[in-house]
Image (tube, rainbow, N blue to C red):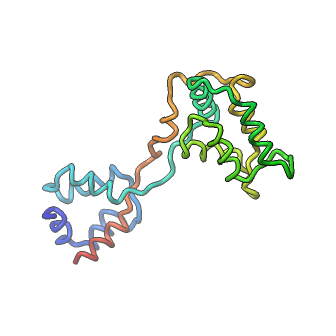
Amino acid sequence: MNQISKIIKTDIDTLKTKHFQNKNEIERNEFIEIMLNKFPNFSRHGMFVLALQYKKHGMYKEVSDNLFRSILQDELRRELFVGFDGLEINFKQRNLDKKDGYLERSSAFKALKSAKLPFSTEIINMLLERFAHHETNKVDYVDLLEYLNYTINPTPGAQGLSKDVLLYRKPNEAFIRVGEFVNDLRKLL
């Protein structure tokens, strides 16, 4: 807390205009460099904690469709999942009234979960997002089945990458919300 009080005693307006150039966001490394130069007694660890506190949660690196599919198929192979026929029947039973190959997203989600696929809720949602029609939000389960079925349409292996790669992706760039940081400093005055 002593280190924060040193920041508060400085001219916050100068910090915002001169150092942050009136931007609302700056790149994390630039933020840390500015703060370490402006406050040399501030611990490096404290600076990283401060940067983490004001980190902007943004876009993550995209995983290519081929890699995504390879990882999913590898995981299905590893778990010896062969219930594609049962999954197809499950989809069709949920679509008895229309038989058009499209299901509401919630019904498609339930069908995938009930099939005991070895995927977390997050990965299933990522998969459904790829096959959901953006206007109707209905899932094309025929294409989805074809996409997953490694017995009919196999992809090359994902070279040892696990499904965790899909969940724990680093952002393209880390940005710090300096506008919010400066406003919070003003509140402490």
Question: Which quadrant holds residue 64?
Answer: top right
Q: Seen in the image, is 62 located left or right of residue 115?
A: left
The quarter of the picture where the C terminus appears is: bottom left
Q: Seen in the image, is 136 located left or right of residue 73?
A: right
Q: Residue at x 60, y 23 (%)?
A: 80
Q: Residue at x 27, y 67 (%)?
A: 15
Question: Which quadrant holds residue 185?
Answer: bottom left
Q: Nearer the viewer, residue 29 or 78?
A: 78
x and y percentages locating residue 14 in the rendered image? 27, 70
Residue 85 to residue 135: above or below: above
x and y percentages locating residue 161 in the rendered image? 50, 27
Residue 169 to residue 151: above or below: below
Q: Residue at x 17, y 52 (%)?
A: 43
Q: Residue at x 16, y 56 (%)?
A: 42
Q: Nearer the viewer, residue 157 or 89?
A: 89
The quarter of the picture where the N terminus appears is: bottom left
Q: Nearer the viewer, residue 40 or 176?
A: 176
Q: Seen in the image, is 8 located left or right of residue 55?
A: left
Q: Seen in the image, is 22 located left or right of residue 123?
A: left
x and y percentages locating residue 41 in the rendered image? 13, 56
Q: How many marks?
A: 0
x and y percentages locating residue 138 in the rendered image? 74, 52
Question: Which quadrant holds residue 147?
Answer: top right
